Amino acid sequence: MTPALRPSPALEWRFALSEELLVKGFIALTPFMIFVAVQCVHAQTMLYSVRLQDYGYVRNNAHFNKVEPDSALTKKIGIDGSGRVYVGFSVRGEPKLHERGEASNIFRVLSVNPLKQRVERTLDFPTQSMKRVGVYVTTTDALLVAANDRLQLLGESGTATATYDAPPILSKYVNTWIVEQSPSGKTLLFRPDDHTLSFISTESLSPIARCKLTDPRNDYDTFNDSMMVKVYQIDYAPSNELVKAELCGTSERLWYLGGQLYYPFFLDETTLLETEFTPSPGWDIAVQKTDGKILWTDRMPGPFEIVSYGGFFTSARDGSRFAITVNEIHRGNSALMINSKIVSVSVVIYDARTGEKKGQVKFQKPNSFIGYELALSPTGDMLAILKDDMLEVWKVQEGGPGLSALQ
């Protein structure tokens, strides 16, 4: 993708599903350069995989609620401190219930123990919407589920100990419905429409801050437990600035970017991951403190490009590691009308503090990027990948020199 201002959250998820935006030109490497680039990596171990269709998963459901957002950005997988993986998906409901206006579909959540290689528990949540659903893990390893326009904090028995009701969606022209979690897991951002932001404590579902957006500078690209950050294009000049604000506060300039653009992601309270710079400063990825200090940078080899959308990125709760999705592109030929295409996909795990690549999981391009998602365990030693209706759980190996180049 040619970097530009980060799209609004409503468009961001739609773009994430567009293969056209994921496939772009690249600088060709000579065979010698390719040979040099191929180096040893940590061997990753797959702990367990689950085929969701065996548990009732359906990709499409003809009995959607008539009122659905154009795009919904939510999490479908999470990992707690004990290594238990939660994955949520849609199950076909009863058409008769839908006709009566009742919750006609099911959002099913599996509790997976990859070390014992088994699904330990199944939880079902009735819901009209098949999009406005999600799974989150709190800092105390409690499960938080979004279903039927309600956030539910679950106890050990699986029953709700606290709830937060979303306002009803009255118009079929709603553009977006978003539930995002801060890097620490303490704060939930609930966005039921294009203009309303609600920040909620994941420990109690009590409100922290709520506001209506009237100034685009006060919107966000990324947030943590205390602030929001956005790359903002200055109206009166062809230049940009990184602005910050307290949650639902008034923005102020963090620093001036000039003509540069990139995608920011918070890793913790004071650290930002930044990807895909335009124009390129000589690197494709950087980790920078909010005081402006750059900790490290990295450059992708020629045929590889970072995907900076939605579920294609994840970070550990303790801020020690993050994982990004990288596409390997086979260059086309416009004169011969041959399109570029994705030939493989890699998930690369970085040490956030040093920039060392801790490991890589490489696979063929999924049949569809719809539903593709990543999750890291709280300490970054376990990676979950959701793709093509399959949940894969990998152990991130320790030791050795790390991954010095993509394969």
Image (spheres, rainbow, N blue to C red):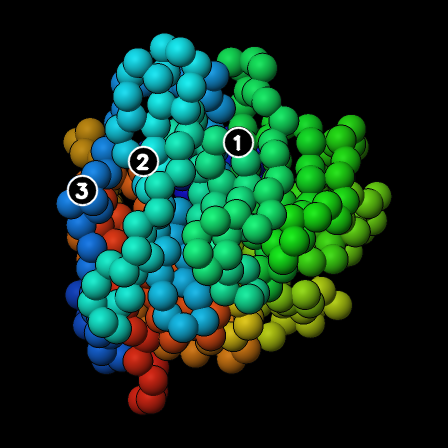
Tell me where residue 63 appears, x and y as whole percent.
31, 18
Tell me where residue 281 appears, x and y as whole percent.
56, 60
Say if mark 2 contacts mark 3, CB within 8 Å.
no
Label 3 packing within 10 angstroms: few (<14), some (14-19), many (20+)? few
Residue under the point 46% across and 60% down: 156
Secondary element at image label 2: strand
Query: Which is nearer the eye, 334 or 190?
Result: 190
Label 2 packing within 10 angstroms: few (<14), some (14-19), many (20+)? many
Name above or below for residue 43 compared with residue 219. Answer: below
Q: Report the number of discs.
A: 3
Name above or below for residue 265 compared with residue 316. Answer: above
Q: Which mark is residue 19?
A: none
Quadrant occupied by the C terminus: bottom left
Q: Which amino acid does label 2 sit on?
A: Ser
Residue that protrudes farthest toward the bottom in the picture? 400
Which residue position is annotated with label 3?
A: 53
Q: What residue type is labelled 1?
A: Asp
Query: Which is nearer the eye, 80 or 17?
Result: 80
- Judged left or right of residue 80, residue 233 is right
Q: Which of marks 1 and 2 is nearer the N terminus?
A: 2
Residue under the point 49% across and 41% down: 146
Residue under the point 51% across and 80% down: 354
Q: Which mark is residue 149?
A: 1
Secondary element at image label 3: helix
Name above or below for residue 48 compared with residue 143. Answer: below
Which residue position is annotated with label 2?
A: 90
Label 1 packing within 10 angstroms: few (<14), some (14-19), many (20+)? some
